[in-house]
Image (cartoon, helix red, strand yellow):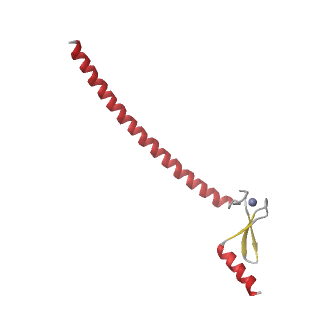
């Protein structure tokens, strides 16, 4: 009789274990889903911030200041004096320099 009881107890433990595994798998899925959502939120937050704040200096990560010189937009860094141009603007600038 005690033997029978043990087997019954084992079955219950097996069932509980299976349920725990299922629960763990479900929880893992939810955690992953949450992580993915957070990552997506972070990505859009970063790109939104980059758009409103403007670009950061690739050298010192200071906020770049947008200025326009003769129709060419320059992003200049007040910290290290660097200047950054769009490729199209750079081409125009080089063409202007070459034309002189
Ligand atoms: Zn800089």
**Residue at 76%, 65% in the rendered image:** 82
Given residues 43 and 57, the one toward you in this image is 57
Residue 24: x and y, percent?
40, 35
**Residue at 29%, 28% in the rendered image:** 15
Q: Is residue 64 left or right of residue 48?
A: right
Most extreme residue toward the bottom is 99
Q: Ligand 1 quadrant? A: bottom right
Q: Is residue 23 above or below residue 93?
A: above
Q: Is residue 53 left or right of residue 80?
A: left
**Residue at 68%, 61% in the rendered image:** 55
Residue 69: x and y, percent?
77, 74
The quadrant in which residue 8 appears is top left
Residue 47: x and y, percent?
60, 58
Most extreme residue toward the top is 1
The quadrant in which residue 27 appears is top left
Residue 94: x and y, percent?
71, 80
Point out the image quarter for the N terminus.
top left
The quadrant in which residue 11 appears is top left
Given residues 81 and 54, the one toward you in this image is 81
Q: Is residue 70 left or right of residue 6?
A: right
Given residues 85 and 44, the one toward you in this image is 85
């Amino acid at each position: 009789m005690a033997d029978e009881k043990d087997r019954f107890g084992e079955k219950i433990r097996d069932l509980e274990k299976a349920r725990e595994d299922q629960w763990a798998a479900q929880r893992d899925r939810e955690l992953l889903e949450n992580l993915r959502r957070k990552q997506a939120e972070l990505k859009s937050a970063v790109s939104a911030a980059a758009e409103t704040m403007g670009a950061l200096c690739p050298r010192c990560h200071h906020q770049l200041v947008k200025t326009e010189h003769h129709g060419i937009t320059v992003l200049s860094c007040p910290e290290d004096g660097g200047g950054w141009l769009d490729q199209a603007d750079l081409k125009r600038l080089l063409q202007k320099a070459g034309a002189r």
